Image (cartoon, helix red, strand yellow):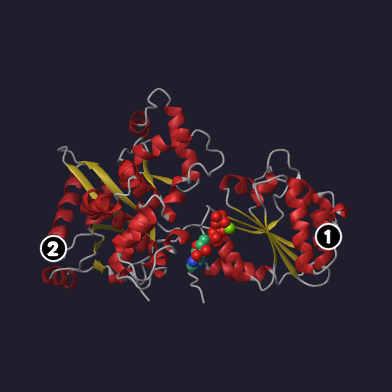
């Protein structure tokens, strides 16, 4: 049987929908390749499934009717169903007494320009469904279009019984797609491919890290390479891809604040364009923004790339495109990627550690967190300070910590350095830092801890050590 990772809540909730005696409508959406169709394929036994195509409404309607005929075994003459209203009416009739599930996949293709599919659906839904026990699932990959269906202005507003945006996997579920790999290797893969199930499923059993990334991501013929290349072009609402690429490249290169990003992307006179581009990409979960812990609502946002595949692409693939096109995949790996990979992973691992804290605080022996940020800036002597983890627990206490991807065991220095930083920040007027000195401390290490560090944690209350293995509780 093929692997099926997580999506437990969605599975259960969707199954529960078919208990209803009334007609119910559900919405499932999310980026391409995130696993929508795969999930829907697991929920019901023999649903009607139609995959809309990027073609005219007429063609889609006749295709749908043909498939409906095959699936239901009824004789259906397309010329009897000229309108979408009559198609939905037909579905209700087929459902009749028996509970039936109808899935319309890539639904956004039925919503192009002057389509009135939604208002026709609403009309039938409100007046003619009676008590037909049917489940209608509208599924689509165009996030903004699908999201608009549940907004206040949409005719469907208030009619949806269930709606969910499917997200890529976190580090933990990603690793479950790669159960044969040592954890450290699986994390490199997550760093390069992110949590898109489709990308992860391209990694093969018998390959090591270098082999799989060279084959699927570096090679211009690689499956993930091709999909990433088309990522921007495939998102509707993104017209000028050049501007998007320039902004992404700036953020990937470490530009964080709007003005820096705009000028690095050549948009210094049009900051509003950069802002808009960032907003669109944030909506697609390609970009995220954050502020220092405790920062005021006036302090500027700092932008980051939210999708590891996209970050890796702009950091390592894009700059080496011409070499990769000439099939120099192996030498690009050796000279331009491998030597920089651990530095790259340092930042990814910080993010993974924050995911661990939010998902598994109980397993780690920690109270539940309410926020989890980082902090970077200058103390009053203009010394630059970075704290990987600054969090507030639900209990009100503070939690601070450091995250190390290094390959040698972490020793107590890291704790004393953090205490020093917190003391300096306290002296610089950061009130939370004072509180943090009396709070919890957490240290993540991908290469374990020294004898001394283990002893320190034993002797000091509220110091928690988390090894790579601890981040993967059973
Ligand atoms: N929960 C999962 N467990 C394991 N593998 C998964 C899971 N979800 C998705 N996959 C893998 O990812 C692939 C892509 O998923 P799927 O085709 O469902 O994406 P999609 O969201 O429908 O994309 P599109 O919008 O392009 O149609 C699947 O064929 C499968 O290999
Ligand atoms: Mg699909």
Other-residue count near label 2 (Cα within 10 Å), few / some / many at <14 / 14–19 / ≥20: some
Mark nearest the camera among 1 and 2 is 1
Where is 239 relative to 394, above or below? above
Residue matched to label 2:
412
In the image, taking residue 37 as reference, residue 333 lies left or right, namely left
The percent coordinates of residue 214 (x first, y second) are 33, 56
Other-residue count near label 1 (Cα within 10 Å), few / some / many at <14 / 14–19 / ≥20: some
**Where the C terminus falls, by quadrant?**
bottom left
The percent coordinates of residue 367 (x first, y second) are 35, 66
Where is 472 relative to 396, above or below? below
Disc 1 on helix, strand or loop? helix
Front in this rendered view, residue 244 or 444: 244
Where is 59 relative to 405, above or below? above
Residue 434 shows up from this direction? no
Residue 410, quarter of the rendered image: bottom left
Residue matched to label 1:
90
Say whether disc 1 or disc 2 marks the residue closer to the N-terminus.
1
Front in this rendered view, residue 272 or 455: 272
Residue 25 shows up from this direction? yes
Determine the residue positioned at 51% across, 41% down.
233
In the image, taking residue 418 as reference, residue 220 lies left or right, namely right
């Amino acid at each position: 049987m093929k692997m099926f990772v997580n999506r437990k809540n969605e599975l259960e909730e969707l199954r529960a929908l078919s208990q209803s005696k009334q007609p119910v409508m559900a919405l499932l959406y999310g980026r391409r390749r995130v696993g929508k169709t795969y999930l829907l394929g697991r929920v019901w036994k023999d649903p009607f499934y139609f995959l809309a195509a990027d073609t005219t409404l007429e063609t889609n309607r006749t295709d749908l009717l043909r498939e409906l005929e095959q699936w239901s075994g009824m004789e259906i003459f397309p010329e009897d169903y000229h309108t979408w209203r009559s198609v939905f009416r037909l579905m209700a009739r087929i459902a009749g007494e028996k509970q039936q599930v109808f899935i319309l996949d890539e639904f956004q293709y039925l919503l192009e320009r002057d389509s009135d599919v939604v208002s026709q659906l609403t009309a039938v839904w409100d007046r003619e469904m009676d008590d037909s026990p049917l489940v209608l699932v509208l599924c689509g990959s165009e996030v903004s279009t699908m999201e608009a269906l549940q907004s206040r202005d949409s005719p469907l507003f208030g009619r949806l019984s269930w709606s969910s945006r499917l997200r890529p996997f976190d580090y933990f579920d990603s690793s479950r797609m790669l159960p044969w790999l040592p954890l450290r290797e699986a994390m490199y893969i997550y760093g390069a491919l992110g949590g898109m199930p489709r990308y992860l499923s391209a990694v093969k059993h018998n390959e090591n890290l270098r082999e799989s990334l060279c084959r699927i991501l570096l090679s211009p013929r690689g499956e993930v390479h091709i999909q990433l290349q088309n990522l921007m072009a495939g998102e509707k609402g993104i017209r000028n891809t050049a501007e998007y690429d320039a902004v992404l490249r700036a953020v990937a290169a470490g530009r964080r604040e709007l003005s820096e990003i705009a000028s690095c992307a050549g948009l210094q006179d049009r900051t509003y364009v950069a802002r808009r581009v960032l907003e669109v990409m944030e909506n697609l979960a390609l970009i995220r923004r954050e502020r220092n812990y405790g920062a005021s609502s006036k302090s500027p946002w700092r932008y980051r790339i939210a999708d590891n595949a996209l970050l890796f692409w702009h950091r390592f693939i894009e700059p080496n495109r011409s070499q990769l096109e000439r099939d120099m995949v192996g030498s690009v790996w050796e000279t331009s990627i491998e030597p920089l990979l651990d530095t790259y992973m340092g930042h990814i691992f910080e993010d993974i550690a924050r995911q661990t804290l939010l998902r598994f605080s109980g397993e780690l022996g920690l109270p539940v967190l309410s926020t989890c940020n980082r902090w970077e800036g200058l103390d009053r002597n203009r010394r630059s300070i970075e704290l990987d983890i600054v969090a507030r627990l639900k209990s009100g206490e503070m939690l601070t910590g450091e995250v190390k991807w290094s390959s040698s065991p972490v020793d107590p220095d890291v704790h004393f350095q953090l205490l020093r930083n917190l003391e300096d920040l306290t002296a610089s007027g950061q009130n939370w830092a004072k509180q943090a000195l009396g709070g919890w401390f957490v240290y993540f290490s991908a290469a374990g801890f020294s004898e001394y560090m283990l002893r320190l944690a034993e002797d000091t209350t509220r110091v928690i050590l988390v090894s790579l293995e601890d981040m993967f509780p059973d």
